[in-house]
Amino acid sequence: MAANLKNNKQVEALKKGFQDIQTVMQEGNYKLFVKQFVAVLVVFLGFKYCSGQFADKINNYNGQIDAINMQQSSEREYMTNKDLLFELEPRFPDISDKNGWLTSQILGAFKEADLTPQMDGSQTEDASNPTYEAVSLQVSSEMDFTRFAHFLADIENNDEYLKVSDFSITKDTDPEHLGSNKIAMKFNTIFPKEKIAKKLFKDYDKIMAQKRAKPEAKKQAGGK
């Protein structure tokens, strides 16, 4: 319906243009518009005697343009999702590392903050989800509120997927440890059962090499 309306508007515009040229010619200024007159006349006659075929061609061209626009939109969406997958998937640890990855990340975070962790129990695992395995570990330490806030912020801003899903704070009543608290935290991570980017994209190794090279190049440039 929209295409027919568009075609009708084009026909009406051509008819009006033809009528305007006729008026100009009657006024004696036809020499100024000879080329325009011939062009409009040819197109007008084409509409008059071949309107069906011409309209079909226009509809066909409009359909092709719509198809191209849809294809470009699909390509952009595909590339956006591909870039997002390449950005997020490396942040999750490989399933082969599930026995030591979470512990090493926790120890590294506490060492960076100059804090002493205490492991409260063993690592728990949940493999009920078909696409990933969830792992958690209870850890406690002693620190004041300000230090805990900075520590938690560092964990949340970590590039890898390391999350504190729950915590509890118990105030230390010992006068010698005024302002200190015992804080118990539950650390979580997710191990995808399968990394799909390498399976989906043939240029996986090339793209990952480029991503690894960028921070190194930036570091070297900053060092200069």
Image (cartoon, grey):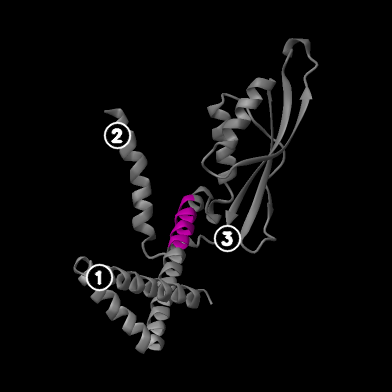
Q: Are marks 2 and 3 in contact (CB under 8 Å)?
A: no
Instruction: Kindly state the secondary structure of the residue where label 2 is placed.
Output: helix
Which amino acid type is marked by label 1? Gln
Amino acid type, callout 2: Gln
Q: CA distance from mark 1 to mark 3?
A: 70 Å
C-alpha distance separating marks 2 and 3? 35 Å
The magenta span reads: 76-87
Image coordinates of residue 59 in percent, x first then y, are 43, 79
Rendered residue at 43%/69% (across/down): 71
Residue at image coords 46%, 63%: 78
Instruction: Return the disc, 1 or 2, that comes first in the chain's sequence.
Output: 1
Label 3 amino acid?
Lys
Residue 20 shows in this picture: yes
Which label sits on residue 193? 3
Q: Is residue 72 above or below residue 138?
A: below
Inspect the magenta stretch and tell me whether residue 54 lies in it.
Answer: no
Along the viewing direction, whichever of 81 and 191 lies nearer the viewer: 81
Q: Residue at x 33, y 80 (%)?
A: 44
Can you identify the residue that label 2 sits on? 220
- x then y, percent, for residue 22: 31, 73
Q: Which residue is mark 1?
A: 36
Give residue 107's quadrant in the image. Answer: top right
Looking at the rendered image, the disc whose residue lies closer to the viewer, 1 or 3, is: 1
